[in-house]
Amino acid sequence: MKKYAGSDLHSNILRLLLIFTLGLFTFSAVFSQSATITPSSPLNEVNLDAEYITVTLGDSETFKDYLNLKIDSFTLVGEPPGTFIESVAGISATEAQIDLSFNGTDFDDDYGSLRVDIEFSQLTMTASGWLSSSNTILIDAYDESSRT
């Protein structure tokens, strides 16, 4: 059997492994952006209207123009009824502050999975869709019936 340079099974396997490995690095570099959220203090039904959330970007992600962030490009997910984003202000290329607004709608169960989604148009590395915060925040309910 005549062998040709670069066409043996071993060379093909090495070539495929190299392509696969380079592909993983490329995939990782493109899709590993992150955002974390931190409340100004523990959130609850009583203080929700006066609090804010700090968004911190990581893994090379930055805001395109942190001084001109668009409120419509930030979404609360898993929020109690009556909770809205009042304003968004850039602090730096990797941090923003979201001021919360709450209209007082009563809720008696805790909300344990508040997260923030950021539209790609505000970000430098995320190419499409929304970047979701990698953590969630608990919002404690205030049960009026148990208070006397």
Image (tube, rainbow, N blue to C red):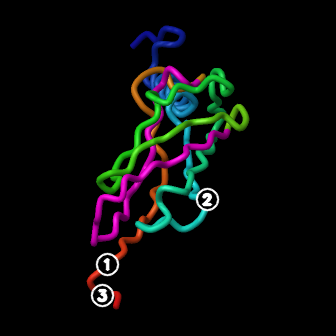
Circles 1, 3 touching at the beta carbon (< 8 Å):
yes
- Residue at horizontal 46 percent and vertical 19 percent from the top: 8
Q: The disc labelled 1 sits on which kind of residue?
A: Asp
**Residue sitting nearer the eye, 85 or 37:** 85
> Separation of disc 2 and disc 1 at Cα?
22 Å
> Separation of disc 1 and disc 3 at Cα?
6 Å
Give the quadrant of the N terminus: top left
Mark 2, other Cα within 10 Å: few <14 / some 14–19 / many ≥20? some
Question: Is residue 105 inside the magenta stretch?
Answer: yes
**Residue 143, disc:** 1
- Residue at horizontal 42 percent and vertical 31 percent from the top: 130
- In this view of the protein, can residue 58 be seen by the observer? yes
- 56 above or below 33? below
For the residue labelled by badge 1, is the local secondary structure a helix, a strand or a loop?
loop
List x then y, in percent, for residue 57.
62, 40
**Region rendered in magenta:** 95-123
- Residue at horizontal 63 percent and vertical 44 percent from the top: 56
- 23 above or below 33? above
Question: Is residue 41 inside the magenta stretch?
Answer: no
List x then y, in percent, for residue 36.
56, 49
Q: The disc labelled 2 sits on which kind of residue?
A: Ser
Mark 1, other Cα within 10 Å: few <14 / some 14–19 / many ≥20? few
Give the quadrant of the C terminus: bottom left
- Marks 2 and 1, the one that precedes in the sequence: 2
Q: The disc labelled 3 sits on which kind of residue?
A: Ser
**Residue sitting nearer the eye, 128 or 93:** 93
**Residue 146, disc:** 3
List x then y, in percent, for residue 105.
30, 58
List x then y, in percent, for residue 125.
57, 25
For the residue labelled by badge 3, is the local secondary structure a helix, a strand or a loop?
helix
Query: Disc 2 marks which residue?
Result: 40
**Residue sitting nearer the eye, 32 or 126:** 126
